[in-house]
Amino acid sequence: MSQRESVGLGVFQKAPDAIDIPGARNSTWRSKYQQGLRLFLLSGCLALGLVWPAIGQSGPLDALSDSAKSLGLNLFQDELLPADQAFRVAGEVEDPRTLRLDWQIAEGYYLYRKQFKVEKLVGGVRLGDLKLPPGESKDDPEFGITEVYHRQVTGSLPLQRLESAATELKIQVRYQGCAERGVCYPPITKTLTFSLPAEPTSASSTAALSQPPLAEQDRIAQTLKDQSFWFTLISFLGFGVLLAFTPCCFPMLPILSGIIVGHGHRITTARAFGLSTSYVFASALTYTVFGILAGLFGANLQAAFQNPWVIAAFSALFAGLALSMFGLYELQMPSAWQSRLASWRGTHGGSFVNAAVMGVLSALIVGPCVAAPLAGALIYIGQTGDAVLGGAALFAMGLGMGLPLIAVGTSAGKLLPRAGLWMTTVKAVFGVLLLGVAIWLLDRILPPSVMLFLWALWLIFPAIYLGAASPLPENAPHNRKLGKALGVVMLTYGILLLIGVATGSRNVFRPLEPLTARIAPTASAETDSFRRITSPEELDTILRTAGGRWTLVDFYADWCVSCKELETVTFADAKVLQALTKMVSVRADVTANGQTEQNLLHRFDLIGPPALLFFDPEGRECKSARLIGYIPPKRFLSHLANLERYC
């Protein structure tokens, strides 16, 4: 030790004790006086550089701090504890469906209630929401008025078991806390491993309400496994009736009605019922067969019939049926074919066969879009290989979709007028509707501008026929006046569509959109913010560059009716657009249905569009959050608000 250091130490150690204070006989005052003088001398020595950093095992700063504390001062703060000492976390298995997580918090520290987060890393379970007790209210400089925990907090984590056997579960817990002195730690992440015991055989298969819900199609697939045969059939029959009122099934109404009206005054109620039943049963049976094949082999065979040549041919068929309704000619099979059919099917056998053939073609080309019940049945078939129950469910659903058609077709046979001018007018009306179906089919393969032009012609020509451009006689009957009013409306909207064609509009429901774009931003322009992809590689690139945001992938095709409904209704909603600005929006276009597009569908075990998939900021798909089929804006917003519950 140097002479300078020794001197300094001598001053620090001996000077206070060497001075006796006259009259300071009270020991308390003497102690205070000595401590104060010691503090003063030590500060002076530090300022003059007379002492070195260590005195025995304690430095002069420590000695200064101790002296200050003895006087009620706190010149130097204690060092912060390491995060692992300030906040200790441990967990244990309470039962096969519940974990207990416990945090021990050091004195002078606290944890934020809202900063707890638990994620699964490994294990055949789904995690529920972490249940925590109420915290203490604190006005925190970081988060304002918030809830915090001191000393200790225990949380309960419910589990949804995907398998009953014993398994290992690895989770990642995240939490954040601060010291009372105002210093906060960064978020802390710990990995915990648990050995979950096998579930007892008496355990209920129903998940707790707090557990993350299954996606709708997965719940339907689970219903097929758990419920009785007849309950399943009744359920899918109900699904079918509900699907009958979706836009996918609307084109079947004029098709079937056109078949019945085409028979003219010869139709009876019984015959109309037979034709309707033939059409519906053939459609449901075809739908079932192709559904089973799709479930077993993972290929959407209906998509193969969306080839432009097939669509064009079927559209031409409807156009031909429509022209026959106008009386230009009469469609019938060659006489030789009619004789053969009559010989083995009876007098009217050919008519029923024709209706059945139209039912098959409608199921293949016009048929319903992919919806959650269909996806659920296909998931069940693919997982279990049980084509009997899966096929029966699909047939029940197809029959349910056809029940309203049978009702409409049978009533048409009862309500149709007998021979005369009325029948000619009715046939002309259904001819116009069949032309609309033909144009609607072409929407899958033609550019939007061409489609707007065709829809304009479809409105203008019947409007002229209804007398929209002709004056009414003074004593015109009421039906003529109503017809003219309808014709004027059709003519006006047809002209608006022609203006839309000239200005570059793409939307038949908003033909003047380009003209109003300068006044206010249009919703359809916002939907163009979807980045289009067609291959798995493009999707992987986007997921890697998502920048820590959630990603929405919309599987879309031009020939998918529900996809168009999602685009023009849900994704055009202002609130939905605002919510999507926080996410990366991707549109997987599978219109071409080539090998690349099929690979993209197969990667996620999808049969076809529409399907909405959600990926977390790490690029992992949250399967429980999948949406299949059309979903209205309000329900979609609710789904987005609860997105993290599904993962």
Image (tube, grey):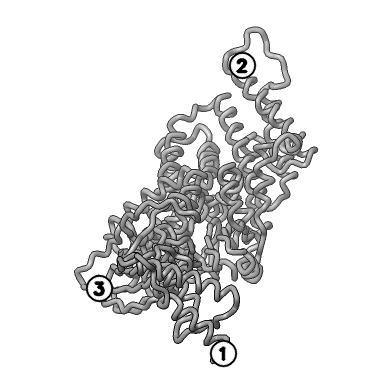
Residue that sits furthest to the bottom in the current view: 1
Could you say which quadrant of the image residue 197 lies in? bottom left
Query: Circle 2 sits on which residue?
Result: 481
Which x, y percent locates residue 537?
65, 71
Rounded to the nearest angstrom, the CA distance separating label 2 from label 3 is 74 Å
Query: Circle 1 sits on which residue?
Result: 3
As helix, strand or loop, the secondary structure at mark 2 comes to: helix
Which x, y percent locates residue 305?
60, 59
Mark 2 residue type: Lys
**Mark 1 or mark 2, which has the lower sequence index?**
1
Say whether marks 2 and 3 touch (CB < 8 Å). Answer: no
Image point (43%, 49%), residue name: 145
Residue 199 disc label: 3
Which x, y percent locates residue 68?
44, 67
Q: Is residue 490 above or below residue 240?
A: above
Which x, y percent locates residue 485?
63, 20
Residue that sits furthest to the top in the current view: 474
Whether residue 180 can be seen here: yes
As helix, strand or loop, the secondary structure at mark 3 comes to: loop
Rounded to the nearest angstrom, the CA distance separating label 1 from label 2 is 122 Å
Pick the residue in front: 626 or 607: 626
Residue 480 disc label: none
Say whether marks 1 and 3 touch (CB < 8 Å). Answer: no
Image point (43%, 71%), residue name: 67
